[in-house]
Image: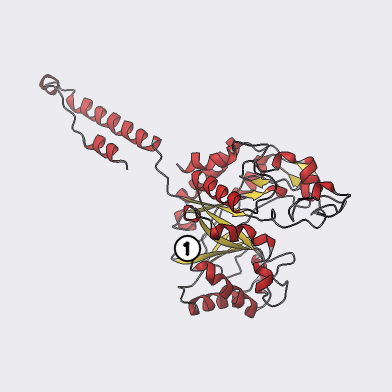
Amino acid sequence: MKKYAVDCLLKPVTLKKSTMKTSLFPMIALLIGIFIFAGCYSEVNAQGNKIDVKVGAYYFDGWAGQHRLSGDPNEPWAKNAPTNSSRRLVEEFPEREPVWGWRDDSQEIMERQIDLAADNGIEFFLFCWYWKDNNGPINPSAIENLSLHTSMNLYLKAKNKNRIKFALLIANHQGFEIKGKDNWGKATEYWVQYFKDPQYVTVDGKPLVVIFNSQGIDNYELAHMQEVSKKQSLPGLSIAGCGKVADKNFNYKTHYNMNPGYVAGHEAHKYAELIDAHKKQWIGTEKQPYIPEVTVGWDKRPWEDKSGNGKGGAKEGWYFPNRTPKEFRGFLSDAITWMDEHPTQTLKERLVLIYAWNELGEGGYLVPTKGDPDGEYLKVIRRVVY
């Protein structure tokens, strides 16, 4: 609490002697005390005391590297396009282009993003991390040079890195799968360089790791990760699995996102339906607490490009085009209320995860864009947590 507010609460109330002689004195004094306290409380909140919650945002770095069609004269849109762009994204959804452009692969842009996140109440990024080689042994050189890790590497070198923490979302799927106990052990050894960074997020005193494909790892492999981490002078790991994890020995469960109707055909639905689908999944237990995840939007039409131009090829599914900052604010507030009402079902650190910082192709993004240059969705987070 601010010093002046404490002074306000402790300041004695002086009343005239004549007032003290009346029988109404006790009631008047009580009312004055209530008004003084309420006034101080409102003023303190207005000064920006952060509530007890830590907000993290998933960071997908498909916005570095060179697109495979960048040299094709028949595809001018791809000339300077990053790896995960598509013709539909550039030509049909130009409002999604960040205010700094489609590319994020410079130190200046990363440091700008760190400041934007920190200034608006985000405490950490969860960078998507990818294994090389798919289903094979670890390939450190390929991992280090993968464009999907560009932003994380820029973050690690940022001069303002201390403003925001980071953690890993292990994206072991679609060409980046980790197979077998030995490889999960090698991956854990590789991640130790991040775990020992003072900016790395911990839960229960242990580095937090979120695994996207929870069905892509078994209990034996989870136990091996813990063993390897302890051999590296760590206290163990706090491992969260995304999706259905009841049959797995994850410490925690959460989601990357939830998208009903993923391949159900081209249909527009209300953002309120997406919110309701999430709330039904906010369930934890004392043994396996839940980290609530809030999806800021979902619309993957830019990646449903059957022509093969760009990323394209995703099957058509539901999309939720009518989101508003007001609805997102209510969604995030409800996640915090759920933690308030279910303290034994969630983490004592009270984490909330946002999908996503920059999933531009899938319609889940907080970054300021040409369609939202003032970052109204990003500002929602500060308005809720402060």
The relative height of residue 324 versus residue 312 in the rendered view (above or below) is: above
Q: Position of residue 306 (x, y in %)?
A: 86, 51
Instruction: Tell whether 376 sits left or right of 351.
Output: right
Q: Residue furthest top?
A: 18
In the picture, which quadrant includes the N terminus?
Answer: top left
Secondary structure state at the residue bearing disc 1? strand
Q: Which residue is mark 1?
A: 202
Q: Within 10 angstroms of label 1, few (less than 14), some, or many (20 or more) residues?
A: some
Check disc 1 and give the amino acid type: Thr
The colour style of the image is secondary structure
Q: Quadrant of residue 11?
A: top left
User: Where residue 38 appears, x then y in whole percent?
Assistant: 32, 32
- Can residue 65 be spotted in the picture? yes
Q: Nearer the viewer, residue 85 or 221?
A: 85
Identify which residue, 267 or 366, lies in the foreground: 366
278 or 156: which is nearer to us? 156
Residue 121 visible within the image: no
Please say if 369 is above or below 315: above
> Residue at point 50% right, 41% down?
382
Residue at position x 43%, y 66% in the image = 205
Image location (x, y in percent) of residue 44: 35, 37
Residue at 44%, 57% (x, y): give it. Answer: 348
Left or right, 319 with respect to 120, comes to right
Is 145 left or right of 189, judged from the image as shown?
A: right
Compared to residue 293, the image places residue 11 above or below, namely above
Q: Position of residue 238 (x, y in %)?
A: 51, 67
Quarter of the image for the C terminus: give it: top left
